[in-house]
Image (cartoon, rainbow, N blue to C red):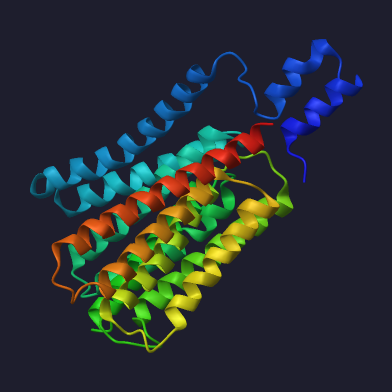
Amino acid sequence: MATIRQLISTWIDRGDLPPDQVSQALVAVGLASSGRPWASFLDRALLWLGGLCLALGMLFLIAFNWSELGRLGRFALVEGALVAAVVVSLRMPQGLSRDVALVVAGLLLGGLLALFGQTYQTGADPWQLFALWAVLLVPWALASAGVVLWLLMLALVNLSVSLYFDAWWLSNQEWAGGRPLDWLLSALNLSAWAIAHGWAQRSGADVSPWPLRLVAVAGGVAVSWLALVWIVDGALNQLWPGLAWVAWLAVLVWCYRVRQPDLFMLAGGCVSVIVIVTAGLARALLDIDEPGIWLMLGLIVLLMVMAATAWLRRLQRELAQ
């Protein structure tokens, strides 16, 4: 499959793209900047930081003045700020400002739930707070054109699942060579990655690749942790965690080397391979009481890093042609 750079180069050679429109075409496909990249970045970054500071500042204000505000004062401040954020989002056109206002409202919603549980001492476990927060964020995420609320929901679901397993003493159980929590988090994050990847392919929208990359990192870390615990615990008689890790790695290479090359995704896969192979070698050499063994292991790690770097640099040169 030809890259965008190769297609534009072909159009220029054939004369299909006039010379005076080359710069505009490069800007349109993201291969060149429009002349003010830092101004645009600072504008977006300061808007997000301002919204985050407003939400967290309101929560810190209530926490610092807990006894002086009283019960009604605390609820009035949080609910008033929440209503104000919702009103601002409704009055804003579809765009970044509306997304920031919705994210602020979503953060304040979590603060309101925490305030309610702290004030009335409902006796609910912490996982219930985060699970309810994630459920209530669904309409906010649907109303937003951005993906920040979806990422927040994914983080809350991961946190609530982890706290649920800790509350019921299920974290150290074993199933198919791994812990049920590790299996569940791997399935959850990899499913989110598959859904996000499918949506990005079908929508064809010109959006930043970083939200998809963050979801992919969450899935890769989860399945790599599953394989790492499998190796460290020595449950090698059950091959399912290793097979799951190999299957994930094969899908990663197929998606981001064969179908749509992405150096960031492939670099993450290389890091996972280095970690898992190093853990396997360390486990195999654990009973050998020779200092030179660990020196050899360090050299093997260095060679793997050099090989991964050389492969990624070669792939980068191929994509740049």
Task: Classify residue 116 by image quadrant.
Answer: bottom left
What x and y, as percent, mark residue 181?
A: 35, 77
Q: Give 315 or 108, whichever is nearer the viewer.
A: 315
Q: Is residue 218 above or below residue 86?
A: below
Please tell me how many numbered marks the rendered image carries: 0
Residue 209 occupies which quadrant of the picture? top right
> Hey, which quadrant is residue 289 in on the image?
bottom left
Residue 246, compared with residue 10, is above or below; it is below
Name the residue at 44% across, 45% down. 103
Residue at image location 25% in from the left, 82% down from the top: 172
In the image, is 86 to the left or to the right of 82?
right
Pinpoint residue 269: horizontal percent, then vertical percent: 48, 56
Q: Which residue appears farthest toward the left when viewing the image? A: 67
Q: Residue at x 38, y 68 (%)?
A: 131
User: Residue 113: x and y, percent?
Assistant: 31, 60
Is 175 placed left or right of 169 in the picture?
Answer: right
Q: Is residue 64 above or below residue 180?
A: above
Q: Residue at x 51, y 33 (%)?
A: 97
In the rendered image, the quadrant that contains the C terminus is top right
Viewer-proximal residue among 73 and 302: 302
Image-based side of 305 in relation to 256, left or right: left
Q: Is residue 27 left or right of residue 295?
A: right
In percent of width and height, residue 265 lies at 52, 50
25 over 96 or under it: above or below: above
* Residue 192 seen from this side: yes
User: Please, which residue is most extreme toward the top here?
Assistant: 20
Is residue 171 visible from the viewing direction of this image?
no
